[in-house]
Image (cartoon, rainbow, N blue to C red):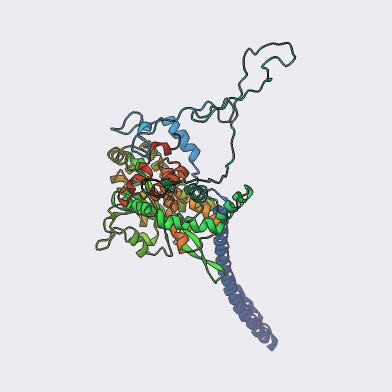
């Protein structure tokens, strides 16, 4: 094109007279202006394209954040495997496999009860999935026979015919809670031997100066920390039954029972957890705390330390300990785990980063990381961008979980042997794939971040291969937060440091009871009776949930 323009200028300059030369100069000036304007426009276009790419990236990032928030609020909490149906078909076609050295029926060894024995298999229900069929009520329920015929037990038409047989119809009935005032009459005797009046000792109560019985206290604490009913709802329930119990009264006595009467039991749970555990899970969640005078709340934290050895056939009773804290800084984590010599499975939060470091109070801790958190990065990427590499990684992680399902509840040595044979090849393929696809994704891309996350924590992620006590994820402790999260939603916030301490103590005792199959309300009533009867501190071991009499176990 430049050659054509130059020839045009030569032709114009060759015209006769000065007009040709002048015209050529004008064309040349216009040409330079056009070229300068073209350069300017190209620079503006490049700048606009760059700005558009930045805005497109920003829009995509905001759309991703909106999708994440929608999933957080409305979506399922569990990660969805895009190949779940295909994996189930493959497992069905391949048939069940039994690890080497394992019993033929591993289901008998999968779960242990609160005393470390095997849990008997659940009886098959006669009702089908749609709820149809005859319902069988539990045998321990009281059965009241109610006659529904004529008073004289004769035919209602007056013919005098007698009853031949009965049509039986069973329905489940409920009697609402009944309130009554126990007016106990303690006689005072005129003792002739001592020549004085002798009174009858009052039955002991935890706090004698209150008119609330141990049973009312146990019921209030169970409703709040067992069934997540905040104090104002309990106040309304009592009011509906004609009983005036203010929420402030319930709060005051619950906090007092927790921080004074039940604190020794909480400390025993903590000591048992720290000193006699082979494997623990640890995580934390936020709970708002009221900031007096500011008209708002501040962020507080609730740590959970959980022991559940049933996945590898352990016989230690399960425990969960909730520890409230104003911070989740590293020093607080080290304070909670000081002196612990055990496996502590956590997520990749930086506060857990120095667990096991020599010269610290937590040098005896082995800290494997969580495959569920690793998988979550890839599932989020696949759900938003449908990245095929993310799908491939999810599929490989699903294979790991499929192998884990086969050995759940088996002894550590059996689990180790099975993992070395079946899980190690899967891990090798996964690591090679992560290395291969790293260069296919931009460094700031979400997929690249997911890959870097997995590669960064790879040494801690594969620790499970050589230790059968380690699980793939921290889901057991994540499940332990469900009651606290529901109570947080219902109660909105904790009122004070004392309330936070009571929250931790009562939640720990209540949820440990549930883990050990203990009926919470009668257990708390019994514990308060024992404490009120001046049980010596040396005998508090019998109050721990796994040591209670069988009458407090659910189903007995």
* The one of 29 and 101 positioned closer to us in this rendering: 101
The answer to whether 388 appears left or right of 236 in the picture is left
Q: Is residue 552 visible?
A: yes
* The one of 117 and 309 positioned closer to us in this rendering: 117
- Residue 249 is situated, as x and y percent measured from the top left of the image, at 53, 57
- Residue 386 is situated, as x and y percent measured from the top left of the image, at 52, 50
* The one of 466 and 444 positioned closer to us in this rendering: 466
Residue depicted at x 53% and y 52%:
486
The answer to whether 72 appears left or right of 510 in the picture is right
- Residue 8 is situated, as x and y percent measured from the top left of the image, at 64, 76
Q: Is residue 67 visible?
A: no
Quadrant into which the C terminus falls: top left
Residue depicted at x 32% and y 61%:
354
Residue depicted at x 58% and y 76%:
39
52 versus 502 height, above or below:
below
449 versus 84 height, above or below:
below
- Residue 363 is situated, as x and y percent measured from the top left of the image, at 26, 58
Q: Quadrant of residue 32?
A: bottom right
């Amino acid at each position: 094109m430049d050659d054509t323009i130059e020839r045009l200028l030569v032709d114009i300059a060759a015209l006769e007279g000065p007009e040709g030369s002048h015209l050529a100069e004008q064309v040349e000036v216009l040409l330079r202006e056009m070229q300068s304007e073209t350069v300017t426009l190209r620079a503006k276009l490049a700048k606009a394209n760059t700005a558009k790419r930045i805005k497109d990236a920003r829009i995509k990032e905001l759309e991703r954040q909106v999708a994440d928030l929608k999933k957080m609020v409305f979506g399922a909490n569990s990660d969805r495997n895009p190949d779940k149906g295909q994996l189930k078909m493959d497992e069905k076609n391949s048939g069940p496999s039994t690890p080497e050295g394992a019993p033929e029926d591993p289901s008998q060894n999968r779960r242990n009860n609160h005393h470390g024995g095997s849990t008997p298999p659940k009886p098959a229900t006669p009702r089908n999935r749609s709820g149809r069929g005859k319902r069988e009520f539990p045998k321990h329920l009281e059965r009241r026979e109610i006659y529904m015929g004529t008073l004289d037990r004769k035919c209602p038409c007056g013919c005098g015919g007698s009853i031949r047989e009965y049509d039986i119809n069973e329905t489940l009935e409920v009697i609402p809670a009944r309130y009554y005032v126990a007016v106990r009459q303690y006689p005072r005797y005129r003792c002739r031997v001592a020549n004085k009046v002798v009174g009858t000792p009052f039955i002991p109560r935890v706090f004698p100066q209150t008119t609330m019985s141990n049973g009312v206290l146990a019921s209030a604490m169970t409703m709040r920390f067992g069934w997540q009913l905040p104090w104002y709802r309990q106040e309304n329930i009592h009011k509906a039954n004609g009983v005036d119990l203010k929420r402030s009264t319930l709060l005051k006595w619950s906090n007092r029972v927790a921080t004074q009467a039940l604190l020794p039991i909480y400390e025993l749970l903590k000591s048992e957890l720290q000193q006699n555990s082979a494997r623990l899970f640890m995580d934390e969640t936020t709970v708002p705390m009221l900031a007096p005078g500011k008209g708002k709340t501040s962020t507080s934290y609730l740590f959970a330390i959980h022991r559940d050895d049933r996945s590898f056939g352990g016989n230690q009773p399960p425990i969960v300990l909730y520890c409230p804290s104003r911070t989740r800084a590293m020093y607080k984590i080290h304070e909670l785990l000081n002196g612990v010599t055990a496996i502590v499975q956590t997520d990749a939060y930086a506060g857990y980063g120095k667990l096991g470091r020599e010269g610290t109070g937590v040098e005896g801790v082995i800290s494997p990381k969580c495959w569920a958190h690793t998988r979550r990065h890839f599932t989020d990427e696949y759900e938003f961008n449908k990245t095929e590499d993310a799908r491939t990684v999810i599929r490989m992680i699903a294979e790991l979980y499929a192998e884990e399902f086969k050995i759940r509840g088996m002894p550590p040595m059996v689990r180790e042997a099975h993992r070395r044979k079946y899980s190690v090849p899967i891990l090798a393929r996964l690591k090679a794939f992560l290395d291969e696809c790293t260069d296919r994704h931009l460094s700031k891309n979400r997929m690249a971040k997911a890959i870097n996350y997995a590669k960064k924590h790879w040494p801690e992620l594969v620790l499970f291969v050589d230790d059968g006590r380690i699980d793939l994820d921290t889901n057991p402790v994540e499940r332990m937060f469900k009651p606290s999260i529901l109570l947080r939603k219902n109660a909105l916030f904790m009122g004070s440091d004392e309330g936070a301490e009571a929250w931790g103590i009562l939640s720990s005792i209540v949820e440990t009871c549930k883990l050990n199959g203990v009926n919470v309300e009668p257990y708390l009533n019994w514990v308060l009776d024992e404490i009120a009867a001046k049980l010596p501190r040396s005998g508090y071991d019998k109050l721990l949930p796994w040591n209670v009499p069988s009458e407090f176990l659910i189903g007995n």
